[in-house]
C-alpha cells in the first residue's frame, strides 16, 4: 500500500501540475500550499465540526445502545418501533438539515443530525450483537437460576462488544458527515460545512480540495480510532467456534396482535413527528404537522401546483437514482466476487474503498463538479460512488465469512475458482448482498439529491433548495415526507424479495 | 452437604417444530433416579438424550409430563443451586479466564464469588489445569475446555449433577483418568448423577444403572442394573464380567 500510495500521489502531482483536468484537479503540493496559506481559518471551523459531531456521536450512541437493549429484552417493542427505526434510517440528512435549523437553534441542529446519523447503525449493531450469542452459555446461566437480565449481563452484553464497536466504527464518520451537512444546509458561521459553503463561489479548487480532504481526514481518523480500539480489545477473546444452534423460533403471535403491532409501527413515526413538534412548540407556519402536510398535498389551493412540481422533480430524480443504485450494486458484487478470485486486487483496493466511504458526500460533490461538470454524468457518478463502496465492503465481508470448512469440502472435491464461487461463496454471501441493497437504497436517493442541490439544479434536490429560497415550508416538509416514504417503500420492496429468496434457500437474513 | 435430591421424570413428551416437519424428540419417558444414585443414559445420536437433560433442567417447555428434582419443579431447584450441569459443548465464555468461567454459575445464582476462590483453585487442580487459571478458552485445547466445563459444573456443590457427554472431546487415556476422578468426586459429594454418554465402557464403569434410549420417537427401551461393588478400581475395565456387561448393553443398544 505504501508504495502504491506514493505512486498514486506522484501521478496526481503530475496531472495537477500539467492542468490535465481543466485545472479542476490541483496538484497535491498546490493543495498543501493553499491549506498552509489558509491555516488560520481552519482551527475554529474544525473545532466547531468536532464539537457538534462529538456531542452527536455520544448522544446518538447512548440512545442507540439503550434502545438496542430494550429491543432485545422486549421483541414486541422492536416490532412496534420498526417503522420509526426505518424512517430514522431513511431520513435524508440533506432534507432534515434545513428543517432542523428551522425548529432548533444554535448547535442543536448539528448535534441532532450527527446523532441521527449514528442511531440506526449503532442500534442495529447492538441488536445484532446481543442476538448473536452462545445459546448454550445462556442455557447454562439459566440452568443456575439466572433470569433474562442475568443472561443479558453475563452472556450477551460482553459478547456484543465487538459488534457495538464495529457499529461505532461505521457510525463515527456518519456523525461527522451529519454535522457537516447540518452546517452546510442550516447556515451558521463556523464549521467545515459553513466554510465549504462560503468557499463554493470562489472558483478556488485548491481551497475546496483542502476542505474536502480535511473533512475526510477527520472522518477517517474517527473510523481508525475505533478500528484500533476494537483490534486491541478483541485480540485474544475471539469466539472459539461458531455456534450452530438456531435461534429459538419466535412464538407466533395471534393475528390480531401482529396486526396491531404492524399498524402501530406504521403510525408511530407520525405520532413521534407530531409529538416532537408539540414539545418544541415551533411556530405553525414553519413546523408542519403530518396533518398540515396532508392538507398541503390535498387541498385544492396548493395541491395541484405542489404535485405538478413534485412529480416533475421525481421524474428527474428517480430514474437516475435507480440506475445509479443498480450500477453501484452490480459493480460492487462483481468486484467483491472477483476479489475472492484475485485476493491481491482486493487487498490493494480495500483501503481506497474505505477512504472514499468515509469521505463526506458534501465535500466530495463540489470536487466532482470541478472534474465532471454539471450534467447527469455527475449525478450518476455521485450515486454510484455512494452506493458502491458500502455495498462492496458489506459483500466482501460476507464473502470473507464463508466458513472455512465449507471451502475445504469444495476444494476436496476439486471445485475451485468460479465453480467454488457458484457452489458456495455466492449463495453463502447472498444474505449480505441483500443487506447491502437494503442499506444503500436511501443512500442512492441522498446521493442524487445532493448532486442535484449542489450541481445540476434538477429534481428533488434542486426543488428543495428553491423551496428554501421561497420559504415554501409546505413544500420542504412534503419533500421530506415523500423521500422518507420512498426510501421506506424501496427498503421494504428489497426486504420482501430477500425474504422470499432466502426462505427458499433456508438461510437467515444478515442484519 | 445436605441430603442429596432425587430426580423424578414422569411421562415426558416433547416435540420440536422443525421447518416443515415435526420431530417427536421424546415419547412417554419415565425415569426415576434415587438420591445419591448414578445413572447413565446411552443411545444413538439424535435419540433425545440431550433433550431429556434440557427438559429436566426446565430449559425447554414440555408437551406433557412432569419433572421433579428433590420434590421441586426444576425452575425452583435450579434457582437455589441444587443442580449442576455440563453441556455437550463446553459453552465457555470466550472473554472470561478459566477461573472466571468456573465462577459463572455462582454469579448466575447471584452469590458472592470471593468466598469460593479457594474452592475454585481446588477444582482447577482436580481437573488437571493447574497453571491455567488465567488462560482464556481460546488458548486451551478442546479437551481442556471440557475439563473447565466439568469444574464449572461442580463449583456450586450441586446435589444433582447433569452431565451431557462431558468427556466427548477427550482422548481415551485422559477419559479413563477422568472417569476415575468423576467416580471419586461423585462419591465424595454424594450427588445424584445423570450422565449422558456414547461410551459403553464409561457407562458400565460409572453407573449403578444404564438406561438405553432409541430414536424416532425418543423413548427408553431398556434399563440395566450394574452390580459391581464400589469403589470400582481401574482394573475393572479389563475384568471379563465387565466385558459381559458391555456386551449386554451393546445388545440392548443395537438390538443384536
Ligand atoms: N432446537 C431444536 N429444534 C428442532 N429440533 C431439535 C432441536 N433440538 C433437538 N432437536 C431434535 O430432537 C432430536 C433429539 O435431539 P437431542 O439433541 O436430544 O439428541 P441427542 O440424543 O442428544 O443426540 P447426540 O448424541 O447426537 O447429542 C433430534 O432429532 C434433533 O434433531
Ligand atoms: Mg446430545
Image (tube, coloured by chain):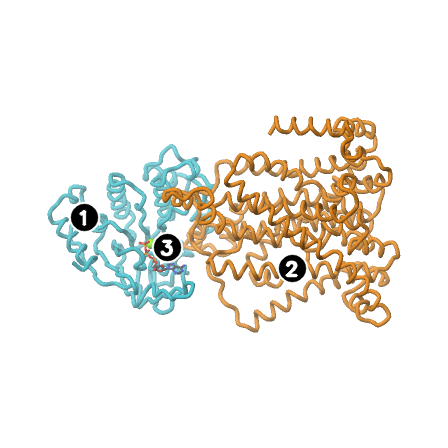
Chain colours: A orange, B cyan
Q: Is mark 3 within 8 Å of ligand 2?
A: no
Parent chain of label 1: B
The quarter of the picture where residue B93 lies is: top left
Mark nearer the N terminus (3 vs 1): 3
For label 1, the SS is loop
Q: Which mark is residue B230?
A: 1
* Residue A483 x/y as whole percent: 73, 58
Residue lying at 30% horizontally and 45% vertically, measured from the top left: B167
Task: Give the Cα distance between marks 3 and 1.
Answer: 25 Å
Residue lying at 34% horizontally and 56% vertically, measured from the top left: B50
Parent chain of label 2: A
Position of the C terminus of chain B, as image quadrant, is bottom left
Q: B107 or A55, which is in the foreground?
A: A55
In front: mark 1 or mark 2? Answer: 2
Q: Which mark is residue B82?
A: 3
* Residue B52 x/y as whole percent: 33, 60
* Residue B68 x/y as whole percent: 34, 63
Q: A347 or A173, which is in the foreground?
A: A347
Image side of residue A380 versus residue A349, left or right: right
* Residue A204 x/y as whole percent: 83, 35
The quarter of the picture where residue A189 lies is: top right
Q: Is mark 2 within 8 Å of ligand 1?
A: no
Image side of residue A429 versus residue A464, left or right: left
For mark 2, what is the residue? A490
In front: mark 2 or mark 3? Answer: 2
Q: A8 or B36, which is in the foreground?
A: A8
Evaluate whether label 2 is on the same chain as label 3: no
Evaluate whether label 1 is on the same chain as label 2: no
> In which quadrant of this rendering is ligand 1 seen?
bottom left
Parent chain of label 3: B
Amino acid at each position: 500500500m505504501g508504495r502504491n500510495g506514493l505512486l498514486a500521489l506522484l501521478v496526481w502531482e503530475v496531472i495537477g501540475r500539467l492542468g490535465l483536468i481543466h485545472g479542476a484537479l490541483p496538484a497535491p503540493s498546490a493543495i498543501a500550499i493553499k491549506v498552509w496559506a489558509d491555516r488560520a481559518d481552519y482551527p475554529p471551523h474544525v473545532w466547531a465540526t468536532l464539537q457538534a459531531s462529538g456531542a452527536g456521536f455520544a448522544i446518538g450512541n447512548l440512545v442507540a445502545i439503550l434502545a438496542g437493549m430494550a429491543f432485545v429484552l422486549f421483541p414486541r417493542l422492536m416490532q412496534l418501533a420498526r417503522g420509526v427505526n426505518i424512517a430514522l434510517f431513511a431520513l435524508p440528512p440533506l432534507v432534515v438539515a434545513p428543517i432542523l435549523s428551522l425548529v432548533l437553534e444554535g448547535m442543536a441542529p448539528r448535534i441532532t443530525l450527527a446523532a441521527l446519523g449514528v442511531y440506526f447503525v449503532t442500534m442495529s449493531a447492538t441488536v445484532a450483537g446481543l442476538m448473536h450469542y452462545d445459546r448454550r452459555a445462556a442455557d447454562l446461566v439459566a440452568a443456575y437460576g439466572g433470569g433474562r437480565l442475568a443472561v443479558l449481563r453475563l452472556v450477551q452484553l460482553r459478547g456484543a462488544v465487538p459488534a457495538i464497536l464495529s457499529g461505532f466504527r461505521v457510525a463515527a464518520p456518519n456523525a461527522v458527515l451529519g454535522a457537516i451537512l447540518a452546517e452546510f444546509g442550516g447556515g451558521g458561521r463556523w464549521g467545515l460545512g459553513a466554510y465549504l459553503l462560503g468557499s463554493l463561489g470562489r472558483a478556488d479548487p485548491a481551497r475546496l480540495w483542502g476542505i474536502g480532504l480535511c473533512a475526510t481526514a477527520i472522518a477517517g481518523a474517527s473510523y481508525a480510532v475505533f478500528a484500533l480500539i476494537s483490534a486491541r480489545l478483541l485480540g485474544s477473546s475471539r469466539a472459539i467456534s461458531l455456534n450452530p444452534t438456531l435461534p429459538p423460533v419466535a412464538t407466533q403471535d395471534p393475528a390480531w396482535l401482529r396486526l396491531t403491532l404492524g399498524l402501530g409501527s406504521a403510525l408511530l413515526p407520525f405520532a413521534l413527528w407530531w409529538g416532537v413538534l408539540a414539545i418544541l412548540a415551533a411556530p405553525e407556519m414553519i413546523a408542519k404537522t403530518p396533518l398540515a402536510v396532508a392538507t398541503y398535498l390535498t387541498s385544492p389551493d396548493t395541491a395541484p401546483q405542489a404535485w405538478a412540481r413534485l412529480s416533475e422533480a421525481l421524474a428527474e430524480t428517480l430514474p437516475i437514482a435507480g440506475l445509479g443504485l443498480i450500477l453501484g450494486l452490480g459493480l460492487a458484487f462483481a468486484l467483491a466476487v472477483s476479489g475472492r478470485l484475485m485476493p491481491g486486487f482486493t487487498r490493494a483496493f480495500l483501503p481506497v474503498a474505505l477512504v472514499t466511504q468515509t469521505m463526506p458526500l458534501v465535500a466530495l460533490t463540489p470536487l466532482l463538479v470541478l472534474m465532471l461538470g454539471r450534467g447527469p454524468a455527475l449525478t450518476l457518478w455521485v450515486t454510484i460512488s455512494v452506493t458502491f463502496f458500502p455495498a462492496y465492503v458489506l459483500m466482501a465481508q460476507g464473502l470473507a465469512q464463508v466458513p472455512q470448512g465449507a471451502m475445504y469440502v469444495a476444494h476436496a472435491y476439486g471445485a475451485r475458482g468460479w465453480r467454488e464461487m457458484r457452489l458456495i461463496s455466492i449463495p453463502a454471501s447472498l444474505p449480505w448482498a441483500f443487506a447491502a441493497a437494503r442499506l444503500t437504497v436511501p443512500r442512492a436517493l441522498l446521493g442524487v439529491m445532493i448532486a442535484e442541490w449542489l450541481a445540476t439544479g434538477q429534481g428533488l434536490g434542486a426543488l428543495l433548495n428553491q423551496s428554501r429560497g421561497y420559504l415554501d415550508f409546505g413544500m420542504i416538509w412534503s419533500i421530506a415526507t415523500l423521500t422518507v416514504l420512498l426510501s421506506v417503500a424501496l427498503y421494504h420492496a428489497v426486504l420482501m424479495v430477500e425474504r422470499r429468496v432466502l426462505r427458499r434457500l433456508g438461510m437467515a437474513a444478515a442484519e | 452437604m445436605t441430603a442429596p435430591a432425587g430426580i423424578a421424570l414422569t411421562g415426558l413428551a416433547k416435540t420440536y417444530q422443525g421447518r416443515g416437519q415435526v420431530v417427536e424428540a421424546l415419547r412417554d419417558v419415565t425415569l426415576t433416579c434415587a438420591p445419591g444414585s448414578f445413572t447413565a443414559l446411552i443411545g444413538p445420536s439424535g435419540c433425545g438424550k440431550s433433550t431429556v437433560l434440557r427438559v429436566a433442567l426446565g430449559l425447554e417447555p414440555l408437551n406433557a409430563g412432569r419433572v421433579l428434582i428433590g420434590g421441586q419443579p426444576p425452575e425452583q431447584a435450579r434457582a437455589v443451586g441444587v443442580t449442576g450441569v455440563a453441556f455437550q459443548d463446553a459453552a465457555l465464555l470466550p472473554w472470561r479466564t478459566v477461573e472466571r468461567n468456573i465462577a459463572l454459575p455462582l454469579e448466575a445464582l447471584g452469590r458472592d464469588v470471593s468466598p469460593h476462590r479457594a474452592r475454585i483453585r481446588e477444582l482447577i487442580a482436580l481437573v488437571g489445569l493447574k497453571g491455567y487459571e488465567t488462560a482464556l478458552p481460546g488458548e486451551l485445547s478442546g479437551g481442556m475446555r471440557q475439563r473447565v466445563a466439568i469444574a464449572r459444573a461442580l463449583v456450586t456443590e450441586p446435589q444433582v449433577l447433569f452431565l451431557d457427554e462431558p468427556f466427548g472431546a477427550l482422548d481415551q487415556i485422559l477419559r479413563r483418568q477422568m472417569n476415575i476422578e468423576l467416580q471419586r468426586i461423585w462419591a465424595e459429594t454424594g450427588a445424584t448423577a445423570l450422565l449422558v454418554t456414547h461410551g459403553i465402557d464409561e457407562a458400565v464403569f460409572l453407573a449403578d444403572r444404564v438406561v438405553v434410549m432409541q430414536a424416532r420417537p425418543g423413548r427408553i427401551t431398556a434399563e440395566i442394573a450394574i452390580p459391581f461393588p464400589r469403589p470400582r478400581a481401574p482394573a475393572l475395565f479389563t475384568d471379563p464380567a465387565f466385558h459381559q456387561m458391555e456386551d449386554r448393553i451393546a445388545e440392548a443398544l443395537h438390538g443384536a
